[in-house]
Image (tube, grey):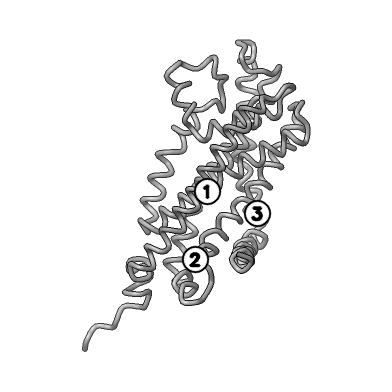
Amino acid sequence: MSTAVSQTWYMTQRQLMVFTRQPAYAIITLIQPVIWLFLFGNLFKKVVELGGFGTTTYLTYLVPGVVVMSALSSNMWAGMGTLEEIQRGTLNRFLTTPVSRAALMNGNVVNNGLVTAFQSVVIVLLALAGGADYPGGAGGVAILVLASVLLGTIFGALSNALGMLVQERESIIGINTFLLLPLTFLSSAFMAPSQMPSWMRHIADFNPLNWAMVAGRSALSDHPDWGAVLVRGGGLLALAGAAVWLSIRTIRTYRRAGLGGRGAGGPRGRPPAAPAA
């Protein structure tokens, strides 16, 4: 177990080095969430007068939604990094070493989790500076960040599994584009559940994105519903475990199939033989 953990941390550090060497990337990835936060926060600020939002300012209501949306949108592209590792042959070289197969996949997931936590804290602080209020205090913020990391783990691990299976950029882009907006709008990201159509509320009850938002909002409120936080947090944790398990299984399937003939150039990851003269 200790070996697997140390190897996972090594693979995580390898991923983090890429992130730290490109500080501009951290800023670029925060631009869109900040636009959502302040553009939508001002555009729809009067909707709280409809009631059911549990807060006096729409910006405060919007913060958990933006944090969770940011976690979703950034982690859904984790499979692109996995696909790049396959196409460059890096993954195949690691598979010839004794490194844990779980570490190969989980290093990416842990790296994304750390980046997601950083982005979530930045968004929360920017919203606080913009006038948002967090009655739940630092504990509520911590639960919101944890919920966003768990959601990111779910979709990051699934994206890794998808990258291993399809090995095509177009497929990953198409699936992510198809899922992002429906998952977002079939949730309480922008509108209080009481103001949503009944069919939409029922769908949101089964949406993991909405679970993270509900847990975060409740933890940040004056009177948290800890039952709702624990149930939805437990659901996110269970889904995260299942998604990580699935991603590890896909790398074993990939290896049994011959180290990715499509992504690495030829059978067992070797370059294709030169044509006969």
Which residue sits furthest bottom? 277
Label at residue 118: none
- In the figure, 176 relative to 251: above or below? above
Q: Is residue 15 left or right of residue 202?
A: right
Badge 1 amino acid:
Gly
Is 201 situated left or right of 140 in this image?
A: left
Instruction: Decide which of tag 1 and tag 2 comes sooner along the chain.
Output: 2
The reply to whether dot 1 and dot 2 touch (C-beta < 8 Å) is: no
**Which of these two is toward me, 215 or 18?**
215
Toward which corner of the image does residue 145 lie, by quadrant? top right
Which residue position is annotated with label 2?
101
List x then y, in percent, for residue 181. Answer: 46, 34
Percent x, y of residue 33: 61, 38
Check the image and name the residue furthest to the front: 1
Q: Which residue is mark 1?
A: 241
**Front residue (pair 135, 169):** 135
Tell me the quarter of the picture where residue 39 sits: top right
Identify the residue position indicated by label 3 in the image: 24
Q: Residues within 10 Å of mark 1 (few under 14, many from 20)?
A: some
Decide: few, some or many residues near mark 2? Use Cα within 10 Å; few <14, some 14-19, many ≥20. some
> Which amino acid type corresponds to the residue marked 2 in the rendered image?
Arg
> Do callouts 3 and 1 mark residues in contact (Cβ within 8 Å)?
no
Alpha-carbon span between mark 3 and mark 1? 32 Å
Q: Is residue 228 above or below residue 269?
A: above
Q: Nearer the viewer, mark 3 or mark 1?
A: 1
